């Protein structure tokens, strides 16, 4: 409870937005019990639930990180950009799930194409703004947090940006599956393809580097060099997942 109170004090907009998304993720879980509509072979509400969860975690993470920059005006502006952009993203994903159709790569009608394009523009805005926040973390020198923790944040954000941009590869292919059609046999919950390459695996691990690597830096690393080495190894691991998918091979 103390941790949640501290998080709320650090950044109220992102704190409440994070909870908003987690509540809606639970709502999607409930919808799965009453609506058996399937999209690409899985329940229609699984995808919005995953996105609500991911956005909630992202919001809490950035709420924790931003005060470290000691730039309240820039942090506040970024926070509202996060809320507007990701709210739009999740509204479109939920709306398309409610309609029983796909949200990503859906250009079956002009309207669906506009929705997909709006999502792409929104995410690109967020990615570029997060890249700027990442730059600020590299430029600022006088942090009071431990060095390995700081480098975990820096490298985690950098990898997040790089693998957020990986989404452009999926857009170019108009698919997240390489070597087969989207919607085949998949792993439990994440639904990554069991038979073909799936670009979502690298996308997932790359974007969640911003949570994983700071924890590694805080709890496991004693020196900056150790954290940087962990960061390099993590990047190589995620890059290998990307190459594996591009070659059409499943993660397992």
Image (spheres, grey):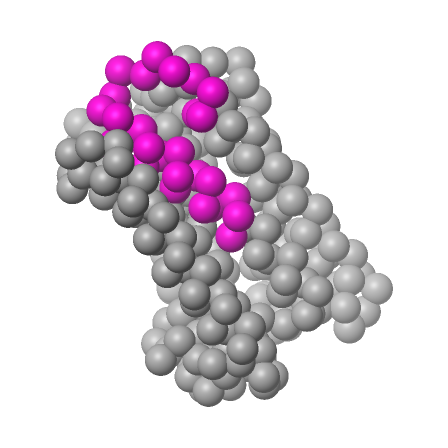
Residue in the image at 33% along x and 53% along y: 233
Q: Give x and y (percent) for residue 106.
A: 71, 68
Give the main secondary structure of the magenta stretch: helix
Residue 198 visible in image: no
User: Residue 127, relative to residue 69: is it above or below?
Assistant: below
User: Where residue 11 sits in the image (x, y, percent)?
Assistant: 39, 23
Magenta span includes 160: yes
User: The N terminus lies in which quarter of the figure?
Assistant: top left
Q: Which residue is pictured at 59% across the width and 33% down the height? A: 129
User: Residue 76 in magenta?
Assistant: no
The number of numbered discs placed on residues in the rendered structure image is 0
Q: Nearer the viewer, residue 112 or 228?
A: 228
Residue 138 seen anywhere in this rendered image of the structure: yes
Task: Left or right? Give the position of 167 relative to 3.
Answer: right
Does residue 187 appear to the left or right of 117 in the view shown?
Answer: left
Residue 247: quadrant of the picture: bottom right
List the single residue furthest toward the right.
Answer: 110
Identify which residue is drawn at 23% across, 40% down: 226
Task: Give the left or right position of residue 131, taking residue 207 as reference.
Answer: right
Where residue 126 appears, as percent x and y from the top left, is 59, 39
Residue placed most toward the observer, 31 or 59 = 59
Residue shown at 43% from the left, 65% from the top: 240
Q: Is residue 112 above or below residue 230?
A: below
71 is higher (above) or lower (below) than 175: above
Q: Which quadrant: the C terminus? A: bottom left
Q: Position of residue 136 (x, y in %)?
A: 49, 23
Q: What segment carries the magenta color?
A: 137-163
Which sits in the foreground, 105 or 207? 207
25, 166: nearer the viewer: 166
């Amino acid at each position: 409870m103390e941790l949640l109170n501290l998080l709320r004090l650090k950044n109220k907009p992102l704190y409440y937005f994070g909870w908003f998304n987690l509540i809606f993720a639970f709502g999607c879980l409930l919808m799965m019990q009453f609506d058996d509509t399937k999209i690409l072979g899985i329940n229609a509400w699984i995808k919005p639930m995953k996105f609500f969860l991911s956005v909630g975690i992202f919001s809490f993470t950035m709420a924790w990180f931003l005060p470290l920059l000691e730039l309240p005006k820039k942090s506040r502006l970024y926070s509202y950009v996060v809320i507007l952009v990701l709210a739009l993203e999740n509204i479109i994903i939920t709306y398309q799930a409610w309609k029983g159709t796909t949200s990503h790569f859906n250009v079956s009608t002009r309207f669906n194409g506009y929705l997909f394009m709006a999502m792409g523009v929104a995410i690109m805005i967020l990615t570029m703004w997060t890249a700027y926040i990442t730059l600020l973390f590299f430029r600022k020198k006088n942090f009071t947090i431990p060095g390995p923790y700081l480098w975990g944040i820096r490298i985690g954000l950098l990898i997040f940006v790089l693998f957020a941009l990986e989404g452009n590869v999926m857009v170019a292919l108009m698919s997240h599956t390489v070597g087969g059609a989207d919607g085949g046999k998949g792993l439990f919950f994440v639904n990554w393809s069991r038979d073909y390459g799936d670009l979502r695996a690298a996308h997932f691990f790359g974007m969640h580097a911003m949570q994983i690597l700071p924890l590694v830096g805080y709890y496991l690393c004693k020196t900056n060099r150790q954290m940087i080495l962990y960061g390099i190894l993590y990047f190589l691991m995620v890059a290998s997942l990307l190459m594996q998918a591009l070659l059409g091979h499943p993660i397992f």
